[in-house]
Amino acid sequence: MDHDDHDIEQTNRNYILATCAALGGFEEKLNISSGKLEKVYMLGDEALGCLKDLKRAIRAESQNPYKTFLPAIAEFNLIESDLIPIILLHARDSSDLANRFILACVELLVPMTWPIQYDSEEDLENYDPNLLDCYRRYKLALLQPKILEAITGLITGPLSIPYRERSLHDQTVIRLILYFFRNITAIPDLEAKHDLSEETLRMAYLQQKTVLRFCETGIMDLLMAIASNSSETDASEWNVIVLEILYNILRNVSPKDVFNGNTVDDNDSTNILSDKLANLLREETRVKRIKTKNQPTRHGRFGGSFAIKGWDGNTLVSHKPEAAYTDLSVLLNVNKKEDRRGKKRKEMDEINVRKTYVSSTALKNLKDMAQTFIDASFNEFYLSLIKDIERENPKILVKDHVPFFHTMRWFLEYFSYEKELANRKNEQEQKKQQEKDDLFNNGELFVPRHTTVEDDREESGRTGGLVGETTTLLNQEEELTGFDYDQVASAMDLRAFMVCLRWMRTAIEQKLWLHAQVAADNFRQLLITVNAMTKAPQEEYREVAEYIQSNIYHEHSTLDLFTDLLKEYKNQSYGYLESAVKLTHVMLKLLEQYSQKNQVMFVRKKKKAKKTKSNTTTRNESGSGDEHTMDVVSEEESNKAINESEHDNSDDDDGDDDERERELAYREHIFTFQSFEKKYLTVNIVQVYCILLEQFETLSPETLYCITSLFHRIMVKRKVEDVFFKINVLELFNRIIYTYPSLPKSGAMSELVQFIRYCTRQFFNKANEYPLLYVEVLFKNPKGKTSSRIQ
């Protein structure tokens, strides 16, 4: 920083200091009732004007990447020293002057807590590392009692006014308050361990306290009301802000934790703590076992030397007792120099990186919010957002797609848990009713129900006998479940699927990997929900699911998109790779079921037409020799041909446009699942899966099952074994087998170990038949070739 910039910064600091001093301050005042001196905040003569001056100063350098006023405000602790005392001073006052003071404070709080964004390298260079700590202190101070209540009181007045009668000032106040709520939820928690100070731990669970305060002050109900009216004109302009707030709240919590969060009463809190303690002790024991598995026990009190002879004749001597237990590769690499070459770092995971909510009260509040949102707000909220995305509304920015897909996936997954629970309860009720019926109608004596003529007429006049009885049973089932697919109808629409697929393709092309990850997670949950609809007792839901699946699988570009998620993997985060693996598992399973149910399937693929005049005859000749291909000329092409014959004297520009449009033709192929499955039977796909499998100690059982399922599909079902006979794959399998005894027991890990043992047996059987396989495992197959010798 040069001398002129330093002078400007010092001048701005002096201006902020003088303005803050003129706001007011604490003075000692005698409390008559208690007779003690108390510190009371006293406003300055021009306090309201000083707040406006601070707002103008912040706005003046809003476009400047290098800030001077905001750091000075943070240094002088304006929020805790002045703004919060001013809000508390006017919290109980409902006059216009009090509202003006609170609104002026909010106008300063919004830019002071604006989310940190790094849109360019210049922003990253000017980033203050202490700014995030200041934000956390701001958030902790603003969450104290009476602050949010006073700020929420500003928005109730403008919202009570009809939309057509609201002024520009009312709309600005509503948007300003919603931005304040968004900024508060966007401040991340501090990542801290449990053995730190109390103040640090308070910073580590700010988001949990935010949810509790939002529920206490009615802010959560206000957000649900705005979301439920998103289809109306008076609330549609705020749907993106509400979307960001929901995303910030649900970003680091799984739907399963929320669903299981409030199943315990207060009396069982001791059991919860004991279970948590037992889990921590179990994890500590597991980690300790891993660290000490190669060390001698306390009974090995005698030393010794161990000599290892290598293939080159050299002898390695180790005088450590650990040499008798540790792995041979570790001993051989003791004296090896560390590789100092740089490694490409993977991108960091940005979603579900830590556990934010640990309180049962917070989880219960989130569960109530999720149930209310699904019941009253889901359809209207996401339908309005889908319309805005399709219309390319300017308020929908690129960054808004991540909250959109993440929150939709979150609520759909939570809905699946509620639906599954409701179905289990319904089955239990039906089972109890069946037991009662069997008890009274056991074949010994049957007493018919006494009916009157009026009852018979009502019974016969319902909807025609058996149809009416079936409809009644279905209605009773819906009443028993309490959750119906109509509550998520906006997501179970083909428009939502197409929006997700289009943005997934755009994200891959533009290398927006976080966007591709959340879109893949959302599409996977959409497919799971559609698969559940195919098993619903209502025929209407089954027809909708059939219609959606037929349209999705009909496009060849959609099927290629799933393989591109894996082929484009280089240095993306493990979260991206895990999302791609889970989507592949669900898609292959559902597509295989759908192809087995439909004997003949067609997929449509765009193909560029030849520019020569004889392209039609050539295409027909090639198509006649293909038994599985059928050329289909679209209606648009036929209409264009008719228009060309009628308008031969058209302009040259129009002719060029028509010729360009004719270059794209649709060709429909008979789809076979085996031919599509071949795209996953490659060395590259297995190598990508092994990159994720390197984290086998921390992977969830669900992810391990998805990896094992594809490996089993490749090696056992399709008998493609050579893709696993690579040195890095076999080394990873050997490491998993070696570490398996110290890993937590799960069914998915057991299945993976069973597959590894089968794979290694097949490898040695092939090696006995073909000894050069020991050499071939050291090399990767050339592109476009397969190792047919092994087969």
Image (cartoon, rainbow, N blue to C red):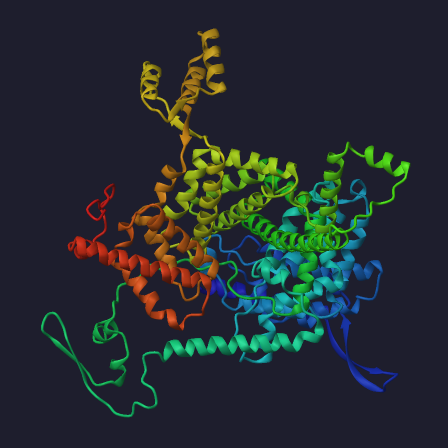
Spot occupied by residue 515 in the image (x, y as percentages of width and height): 49, 49
Q: Is residue 70 visible?
A: yes
- 254 horizontally vs 641: left or right: right
Q: Position of residue 205 (x, y in %)?
A: 60, 70
Q: Is residue 354 above or below residue 462?
A: below
Point out the image quarter for the N terminus: bottom left
> Would you place residue 646 above or below residue 512 in this image?
above
167 left or right, relative to 18: right
Image side of residue 314 versus residue 669, left or right? left
Relative to 74, 48 lies left or right: right
- Identity of the residue drawn at 75% across and 52% down: 437
Q: Nearer the viewer, residue 404 or 755?
A: 755
So how many labels did they put on this image? 0
Q: Is residue 392 visible?
A: no
Name the foreground residue: 558 vs 155. Answer: 558
Quick one: which residue is furthest to the front in this view?
A: 444
Residue 289: name its quadrant.
bottom left
Image quarter for residue 386?
A: top right
Where does residue 65 sit, x and y in percent of width and height?
51, 56
Q: Position of residue 463 (x, y in %)?
A: 78, 33
Outermost residue on the bottom side: it is 301
Residue occupying the point 24% across, 58% down: 727
In this view of the protein, which residue sits in the foreground, 18 or 251? 251
Rendered view: 629 above or below 698:
above
